[in-house]
Image (tube, rainbow, N blue to C red):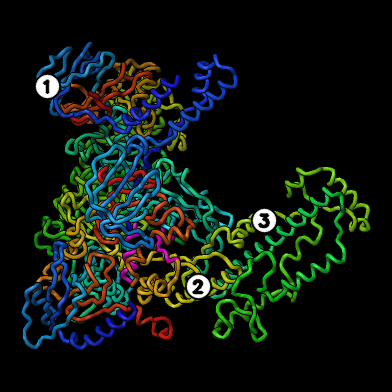
Amino acid sequence: MHKRMVFTLALLLTASVALAGDSYAIKAAGYLKPDGSIEKDITLLVIDGKIGAIGQDVSVPNGVAVVERNDQMIGPGLVDVHTTLGTNGRNFEQANSIEAGARAKELFDPDHHDFKEAAAAGITTVIIAPASTHLIGGRTVVVKTGGPREERMMGEGPLKLSLTQEAFNMRRTPTSLTGGLYNLRQMIAAAEKNKNDQSAFARWARGETHALVEVGTPEGVSTLAQFAEEQGLKCVALYANQAAERLDDAKSLGQPIVLGTYEFSDPRRYTRNPNILAANDIPFALTSSAPRYQSALMRVGAAMVMKQGAPRSAVAASLTTVPAEIAGVAKRVGSLTPGKDADFILYDGDPLDLRSRMRAVFIGGERVYVSETLASHDGSKEGGKS
Amino acid sequence: MTGTVSRYTQSPIHPVDRPPLRRWGKLKYSCYCSLNGRDALTMRVICRVILGWVLLTPTTSVWAQGGGITAIRGATVLTSSDAGTIENGVVIMRGGKIADVRVSSGQAVPPMPGLNLIEAEGKYVTAGLIDAWSTLGLNPGGPIAPVATSRATDALNVYDRDAFADALRMGVTGVCVTPPAAGGFSGTAAFVRLKDLNDLAGNVTDDVCIVAQVGLGTKGPVSRLAELKALRDLLETAAAYRDALDEYDEKLEDYKKALKDGKTVKLTKDDDKEKEKKAAKKGEGRRGRGRRGRGRHPEHDHEHDHHGHTCVGIRCCDEITEDEFVEWLQSLGEKKEEGHVPGDDIGNEHVEYDPWADPDWASDEPEEKKDDAKDKKDGDKKDDDELKKPDKPAYDPVSEVLMRAIKREIPIRFEVHRPGDVLHVLKLIDTYYLDATVVGASGLLPVAENVADAKVGVIVGQVIGSAGGNDRSHLRDLNLQSAAASQHAEVSPLVLSSGRQGNGVGGQYLTQNAALAVSGGLSEDAAIRAITIEAARSCKMADEIGSLEKGKKADVVLWSGHPLAPDSVVEKVFVDGVEVYSREGGQ
Amino acid sequence: MMRRLLLMALCLPLITATTLFADDRADESGPILLKVGKVYVSPNEIFEPGAIMIRDGKIDAVGESLPAIDDVRVIDMPEATITAGLIDAAATVGYRFGFHDAEHRSEVVPETRALDTVDLHDPGFADLAAQGVTTVYISPDAASVIGGQGAIVRTAGPRAQRIINPASSIKATIGREPIVKASFNRTPSRFSGTSFLTRRPTTRMGLTWVLRKAFHDAQMVNRGETPGTSGEGSPSAESMPILVDVVKGEKPLRIQARAQNDILTALRVAREFNLTFVLEEGTEAYRCIDELKAANVPVIYGPIFDYPSGWRAQAGEADRFRLSAPRELLDAGLTVALSACELQGEGGLGRMGAYARRCGLTRKEVLAAMTTTPAQILGIDGQAGTLAAGRGADLVVWSGEPFEATSKVNLVFAGGALVSGRIDK
């Protein structure tokens, strides 16, 4: 095994020359399709940082280098729908609870070291959100964790709100949920009257777009469902961790549900929720809540919920297509489809299997991470057993 | 877990009702009053025995399963033993034990009363998973720092049925519950077998091992040295205590013999000389070995010349590195004066008599006590000739616990993460010749060979997000690879467990943790063994559980696919041959 | 002997087997005919014996005896009685956050709604349903001088039937609670400066000032005038529309007051601004019966307890509590409803009914105080409070006469569904 590690590392190093350009083809043992199944013996063609073609019968144009990775599989880059990483400074504006005009875009620091960790965990696209300590935190931003610099900023994402207890305190108004919902009603009524208002809040108020609303508890899901029904809003419940206990309310929201980060120490009453949601055709997304939790826990959480019975298709979607749709970038990322950005990951085996190691991560066709192996650490001990 | 935790309700517990036998006895007695007294008594006893057996035998196992054999066949059996993996195997359980594990003949078997045949083609069978390091069932909260005398059993909530049920449905049949972490020794662990969720208390084994932590959190080098010193001091005291107790035992034997013979025991100059000789033998440097106390470490028969200094203990001095030599020098600073042997201070001096400190004394002949008091008043001239009952050393609860580790009666676990701390702990283990395991070990990569050479086992906790502050991205791969590194260095046993992340829940994702370790380079076979037989070995239960071998307890799990595969689930769990979980019975 | 023993031993698995397989709840859909000893259609209209037919969640018919037709399931309980579901007109249940349920940015927040912060799946609702209380008015928190709008909800039943009125009357409080409870009202200081919390009230004087200022400004706005100095103490622009509605008499108002002087203050303020209100709690109402009678104020009296506890004990406002108070109020001809407020343990409202009877009320008066009168006060007497054909089934089946210490609640129907108790085959 030791020798194999060294060999693989050497292979990757030599192959890096071929991958320096933006067009190349990779022959792999398989790739993960959006429905969670694996198509075997495929070729991925990357042209100028985008996916040119993928499948079993792909003709590689002349002049494009072909790299053999027949022991590896390809999976789409993961999309994290709620993080607070990569910010230059704090992400909460303390004085006011309602900051509808705030934009996380202004916090984005492309050189922040958080992004490297996220990329190393296979997360290629993230939403950076304002803090949960506001009733209306502001607008989120969707960025890539690596790749060509000019393509890092993808655009602005949905509005973020929070109806949790964190959002309310006695230092500023509104001090409670009742006050907060009243304010929202007034603001929504004003936006509905004024059709010229094209701000993010107004468009959400009129039901044209969706927003991320943090709820945190099952009671929060019910409150949100009631409010959304009353006002005709599209709300993606964020951290609705026990949404399965309020199934009717979760269904009535009519939007995907974002579930929090799972750890090995979580009891089953949390980790069985995705299974129940999937059985009721409610799409869900998993998030890593980085940097509060390790980015690597996103993939681990997916494996955990699969063990609790969630189907492969729902789990694969929860890491890729569902969060991409919530972020509004489903046309560019989330699956390995021709025309989308070449954000993908090379795995040792089945991408949804924790036994498969992430060998390399690519964003926009550019390799942003390659996994260290025993070989690189054993450098000092080569005299030992081999 | 993000978000606020909402209300958590416990399921009601219905302990097994045991009707009082006395009532039945009385009834029967009235029926047997015609018999003479002795026969009636015998009849009563027999009736009670039979009734007791009938009432106490679990109805499910005997009545429901027909009191017979359970066989699972057609599956791939991962035995976790030398038999390896058996394709198309059959596992036969009878009487709570594994009767046989072999290749299945594939013949059709007619339905027989008492035979429960499970056809399991395309499925996998493993031994019940064992979580060797977990906080499952411990009452959460409570920042009180545990001490060496704490016991995990005391904090175990045996009614936390939900947490144990969650673990059981993921294939875990045995859990070693360790006390929560705090620097130094934190007490003894308990082993819980998930045989009957309604009677967890009846399946708990106490004092499986002693747990200690070194270098947790981001402490500086000075506090780490202090921590190690504290551990060393406690162990040293325990060793001394053990020596003192042994000495006391010998003296007590002599005293009792003398009492019987009517002789007096003299503390003559000859005795003193003997004592000096012994002291000289012990005084072969700080780490010399006495006749009793610390065990004789076979590798430290100092045959060869050590250039005038004492063997450091890890490797032959030819291979000592600069850093280790410096460390050894530093440790010398704590050495006591030349020729001092621990234990000298105890037993030779006269200990003030305190009846409450020594219950043995209080129950013994009270006259002796009066005589001694009188003798004391009479002066010294009688001391040498009088029979003196030896004084038992004062009871030291911490030493009582640690003594068992020094005597190698129970193993001891050190939770360490940094490579440097691992080396220190190895030295400690070597000094006291402890039966030890290194636990946590997220930074094991550079020192795996040292650990293997020291023949110390390793228990790896959570591979991602583990404690020890190794969450920085450049060390992430270290975490993933610590298990693989251990395997590479041939550490034995190599165990994967839940670790200390807990809040009273754990064990559910042993297979996922193992899968992560596989992605770090561990072989799949070693991964399965790490959560079954090796885990049992680290809890000293490898004779009874941990693998599918003839004669072991029938703790068997049937999986829908390979246990480490992402979508395989547990279909059935048997503990002691009884089916305690079945997937069809409801999620 | 041995044989007997063996027989007993063999019976063991059978016994355990039967306990292992729990009996399924009988299918509750489909028409049900309840035949009981007495049906209280309303406090004055009684059928003895009586029968009620429930079909498709509605009361099909009520009478002395009804024919059992088609596939109706007949449940015969000759000792039992049936009443309409009890209504608690001043309950505190389902709040999620404690003192953060009330909005504290101002002491006058009638624009907020209690329902926004109530969890309809809170176990407290199920407890109330099990006690026979099928409808409640969720009373806004007493921490505000003029609090938000309460909600009238059913305690259990199908989701579509739960909310009867999401924004019902607003509640003002005169007493210690707005001054003391979760109060951060303070004077400006060198260290903390001023904030929205630098405001009244810290005394009853300030409290009444805030109350009067609110209605005073509302009256001005109603007349088309601009209220005087705006700034600290004036009601916010958001609260004005609702305050104007109250002044106009279009929005109901209730005032919580326990001590006699507080009740008199409430009457005085109401007289000054020509308001109609409902008195909530009214622990010392028996001391100002004439004034209440003259102003024709309905009283939601409660709770009935042995010893005061909680806020009313701390504030000393319940020191002159009398068990005979409901009797005295009724004798004077006042409209009296009984409520358990937040004391919902151990039988709750039903048990308080037994206490009330012990202290002089007749069974019919207690029933009226818990069904028809609160329905009338809350404005839902068209759909709750009495048993009428065509209405959704909100009824309680008692094991004996209601409001007896020896009776318990057997079955409860709310919104047409069986929400408490089981019907075995």
Quote the CA–CA distance across marks 1 and 3. 79 Å
State which quadrant residue A216 falls in: bottom left
Residue at (16% x, 27% y) in the render:
C382
Question: Mark 2 or mark 3: which comes first in sequence?
Answer: 3
- Name the secondary structure under disc 1: loop
State which quadrant residue B17 falls in: top left
In the figure, B192 relative to A105: above or below?
above
User: For this rendering, which residue is in front, B48 or A91?
Assistant: B48
Residue range highlighted in magenta: B493-520
- Residue linked to disc 1: C71
Q: Is residue C393 visible?
A: yes
Give the mark count. 3
Residue A133 position, x and y percent, is: 32, 60
User: Mark 2 or mark 1, which is nearer to you?
Assistant: 2
User: For this rendering, which residue is in front, B57 or B321?
Assistant: B57
- Name the secondary structure under disc 3: loop
Q: Is residue A101 visible?
A: no
Q: Amino acid at mark 3?
A: Asp
Q: Which mark, by number, is residue B396?
A: 3
Residue at (42% x, 62% y) in the render:
B534
- Residue linked to disc 2: B422
